[in-house]
Image: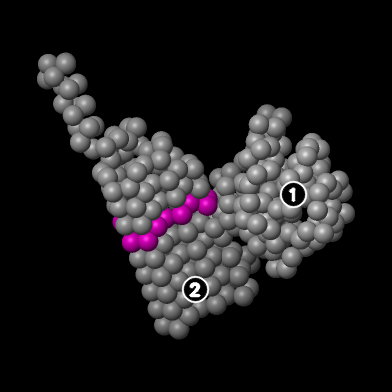
Amino acid sequence: MNFSKPISVTDIADKYHLSISGEKSLYATGINEIHKVREGDITFVDIEKYYTKSLTSSATIIIINKAVDCPPGKVLLITDDPFAVYNQIVWDHRPMKYLTADRGENLIIGEGSHIDHGVHIGHDVTIGKNCYIQSGVFIGDDTVVGDNVIVQAGALIGTDAFYYKKIDGKYHKWRSGGKVIIENDVEIGAGCTICRGVSGETIIGEGTKLDCQIHIGHGAVIGKHCLIAAQTGIAGKTIIGDNCVIYGQVGVAQNLRIGDHTILLAKSGVSKDLEGGKTYFGVPAGEAREKYKELAGIKMLVGK
């Protein structure tokens, strides 16, 4: 998530009552979870075993719950509750804007696009040229839709991330400050749900086609020219490569990478990264030929 303009770390420290260690002259240009950080970003850490990952990441500013040695070129902002500060910064830069009409503020619709009656569109949304958005669709705040996109009836785009942090036995909701980006020539089937990122983007790549009743989790990236069949679920922050084919009722766990030109056969369950250019099947998913050999071997053992 980018800020509208850079913010000095001293201003951030003053506003949220934080102690500073490191380069006090630095500026923050955005805020992101550790999985999405870039130079200039703020991130946070509050568990010691993840300190090294955060301190050596691309993030420039780290909100942390303990004074430690600050790496060169970075700054630490120290507080007892890094998550609360991080979440509040996102809230402050992505405040809740309630929708009181069918169309939100700052809507841009490209030439030749048609929006059916009964579509609800949030604030700061851009829709490209020659798109068709069917009745019953919801498009949430900050969504970007490319050219020649079809969104079929009842699809929900830009809903909140299903993302919580457990503190003292209770789940606390992360503010969903990210967005959804749908690139050119994409088709979204009826009843699909695509969650916005927590702080980064959920991306549906150019030319990709989604069947009905598919769920795409927060911050997931679907590559270009993929074909995904009904009732598939792809969990948050997983990256699917280009030219992949995913058959029906496939489940893909969070934080994975699926290589280009992968085929996932129906009802497969993916729990680890998969090399591209291969066909996979089963739960947990493995190379299809090997899985079928395993099934044949089991049949021989039980005498059927």
Marks 2 and 1 in Cβ contact (< 8 Å) = no
Amino acid under disc 2: Ile
Image quadrant containing the N terminus: bottom right
Q: Position of residue 78 (x, y in %)?
A: 81, 43
Query: Quick one: which residue is furthest to the top in this view?
Result: 302
In this picture, residue 107 sits left or right of residue 42 = left
Residue at image coords 52%, 52%:
219
Residue 267: name its quadrant.
top left
Callout 2: helix, strand or loop? Answer: strand
The one nearer the camera, 156 or 74, is 74
State the mark number for residue 127. 2
Residue stretch rendered in magenta on the structure: 218-228
In this picture, residue 124 sits left or right of residue 135 = right
Amino acid under disc 1: Pro
Is the residue marked by circle 1 packed among few (<14), some (14-19), or many (20+) residues within 10 Å?
Answer: few
Q: Position of residue 216 (x, y in %)?
A: 45, 51
In this picture, residue 241 sits left or right of residue 75 = left
Q: Position of residue 58 (x, y in %)?
A: 63, 51
Residue at image coords 49%, 73%:
127
Residue 171 counted in the magenta span: no
Is the residue marked by circle 2 packed among few (<14), some (14-19), or many (20+) residues within 10 Å?
Answer: many
Question: Which residue matches tag 1?
Answer: 72
